[in-house]
Image (tube, helix red, strand yellow):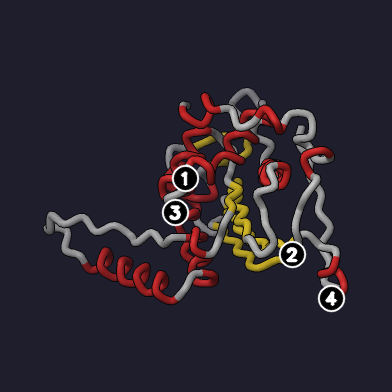
Amino acid sequence: MGSAAILLSNKKESKNTSKYKLFCAVRTQRAFEDKAYLSAIREENSNGKLGVTLNRDLLQVAAEILRTNITILDSKILPFSDKLWHGVSIVRKKFAHKDQDINYNYYVPNFKTVVQHFCLPTSGRPLIRDIAKGLKLSERDIEPALMTLHRFGNQSSSSLWYELCYMEAKERVKKGDRVWQLGMGTGPKCNSVVWECMRPIVGESSIGPWADCVQKYPITAINQGD
């Protein structure tokens, strides 16, 4: 069982001791839509046993809510040029004639121009790699997610904090860097939180949850294969 705790403050003097400040947060949910709400639901079966039912629409719903969340996020943090091209791609795809052979794809902005580190859902290696492909992330970008999945398994929202601790233990997060935590869950819902590092972070390799094993990571075999 995983767990995580954070202390948030809105006091101005806290900036002198805080690791991060909240740069941006976006929450999207589609519980208002029956197809989305019923895509993953807790209910009893015919024998009266309580469980979770996953419907065939789940992957489509997850992709749609993820796309919506990222679209809202990019409008808040990306430079104007990326916003412009993304808007153009949406218009082109909307008005493209179905009988045309041209397949217009949505413009994928380069989030790495404003975000340096990524914490992704650890529901499985295929999902991590699919999200990475969609966001044009490198193996190094998804290393914290893959190593967290290997070390701790899928611990739901706690995994995002284990990923951040991994980056800190490796001393990759520098002052001024931004970290994007992307979480998904039933409801269905999707949350994005972007943090900005306030000070140098050192010494975490000896006190955090990775203290007893961080020197063993990354495991190359996990990075390269599924």
Q: Is residue 71 above or below residue 209?
A: below
Three-letter code for the amino acid on which mark 1 is drawn: Ser
- Residue for point 51% across, 33% down: 125
Task: Name the quarter where the N terminus is drawn.
Answer: top right
Q: Alpha-carbon neighbours of circle 3 within 10 Å: few (<14), some, or many (≥20)? A: few
Residue holding disc 1: 138
Three-letter code for the amino acid on which mark 2 is drawn: Met
Residue holding disc 2: 198
Residue holding disc 3: 64
- Residue for point 58% across, 27% down: 219
Q: Position of residue 83 (x, y in %)?
A: 41, 72
* Nearer to the camera, 205 or 179: 205
Three-letter code for the amino acid on which mark 3 is drawn: Glu
Q: Is residue 94 above or below residue 150?
A: below
Q: Position of residue 212 (x, y in %)?
A: 79, 29
Of labels 2 and 3, earlier in sequence is: 3
Q: Along the horizontal axis of the image, is 33 left or right of 26?
A: left
Q: Secondary structure at mark 1?
A: loop
Q: Nearer the viewer, mark 3 or mark 4?
A: 4
Q: Nearer the viewer, mark 2 or mark 3?
A: 2
Q: Alpha-carbon neighbours of circle 2 within 10 Å: few (<14), some, or many (≥20)? A: some
Residue holding disc 4: 12
Asked whether the viewer can see residue 187, the reply is no
Asked whether the viewer can see residue 126, the reply is yes
